[in-house]
Amino acid sequence: MAEKPKLESPSVEPLPSNALKKEQKHSLELSTRASEFIRYEINKSPEHERILDIINDATNRLFKQYGLKSKDQDYNSVHILSSEAPQTKPFFETGRGDIIMPDISNQSKLLFAEQLFHETMHQKTVHRHDGPYSYQVGLMEQNDSSEIYFEELNEAITAELEKIFYQNVLRTEPLFKKEAALVEEIKDKIKQGPEEDRWISDEVCATIPEKDEIHKIKQFSYPNRRRALRIIIDRLCEKQSEYFNNREEAMDIFFKAMLSGDTEKLKKIIESAFGEEAYQKLQRGLREFLDFIFEEKKTI
Ligand SMILES: [Zn+2]
C-alpha cells in the first residue's frame, strides 16, 4: 500500500512564449521515427487487447455522445514496445496513423490505458491529411504556409478528456480495480490534508510502485495547458453568462470542436466574448490568448 505517497510538482511544464516558433512536423519524418520504434514491437497480450477494447468502446461512445460518427480502431496500428526499445514517450504519427506505446502496463495499467486513450483520441480525430506538411488532427492544424495552429489547445482538451475517461470508465472497470482503489485512497488523503494542496487530488491519475512500498504519484498530462484552459472557460462563462448555464456547457463547445474538427461555433463564441482578434490569438497559443484577454498578465 502507499504509506508515503510522493507528490510530483504540479507545475513542471512551462507554457511556450510563442507557439509559432515551433518546428513543423513533417509527417514522413514522424513515420520514419515511428518505424525505428516499430522494430521493437511485441505481441499484444490478452490484457493489452482488453485495454484496447475498453478504449475503443469508450472513444466510440464519446463521439456518439456529441452526435458524431466514429470508426473502430485498427489494433494493428497500435505498436506496443518491448523493454529493450529506446526510451520514448507514447506518440501518434499522422503519416501512416501509427501509435507508438512503450509498455508500462506492468508498472501501471491505469497510466498505460490513460496514455493509450490520449493517443487514440489523436488518431481518431485526424480530420484532414493532404500532404506531409498539411494536416488537421483534432483542432491542431498544420499548413504548407509554415504555421501551426491550436497545438496547445488541442493537447489541453485531449488531456482534459483523459480525466473524464478515468472518472467515467477506468475508476469502475474491474481490470483496474486494485490500482483505482489505491488512487482513490490517495486522493482522499490529499483532500484531508492542507487546504492549499487539495486541488492536487483531482490531478492524480495513477501510481507507480517504487522501492520500500512507496508509490510515485502520476498526474494527468499537460497540467499547465489544462490550467490555462480552465482559466479560459471561467472567463468565457463570466463574459457569456446568458449563454452558458454552467462550465460543462462551455467546455462542450471545445470538446465538440476537437472531435469534429468543425471550429465554426468555437470561433463565434470566442469572437463574441473577446472580440474579433481573440480567435487568432487562441490559434497561436494559450499564453498569447490569456495575455490578450486579461489586462494584467496572468501567472500560469
Ligand atoms: Zn497529445
Image: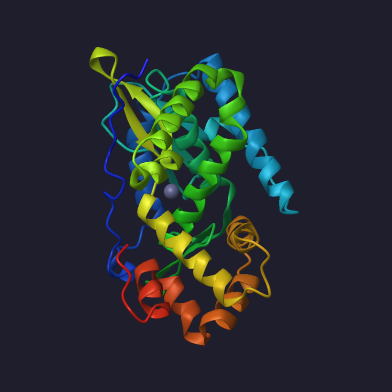
Residue at the extreme bottom: 276
Foreground of the two, 236 or 185: 185
Q: Is residue 71 visible?
A: no
| Nearer to the camera, 218 or 3 | 3
Residue 95 at x, y percent in the picture = 46, 49
Report x, y in % for residue 81: 38, 26
User: What is the quadrant of residue 186 in the picture?
Assistant: top left
- Give the percent coordinates (x, y) of residue 102: 37, 29
Q: Is residue 68 left or right of residue 6?
A: right
Q: Residue at x 64, y 61 (%)?
A: 246
Q: Is residue 44 visible?
A: yes
The picture quadrant where one finds residue 242 is bottom right
Whether residue 45 is situated above or below residue 237 in the rendered picture? above
Q: Quadrant of the C terminus?
A: bottom left
The percent position of residue 225, horizontal first and vertical second, equals: 39, 57
On the rendered image, what quadrant is the N terminus found in? top left
Identify the residue shown where x is 34% and y is 38%: 89
Q: Against 153, is 208 above or below?
A: above
Q: Residue at image x 33%, y 70%?
A: 298
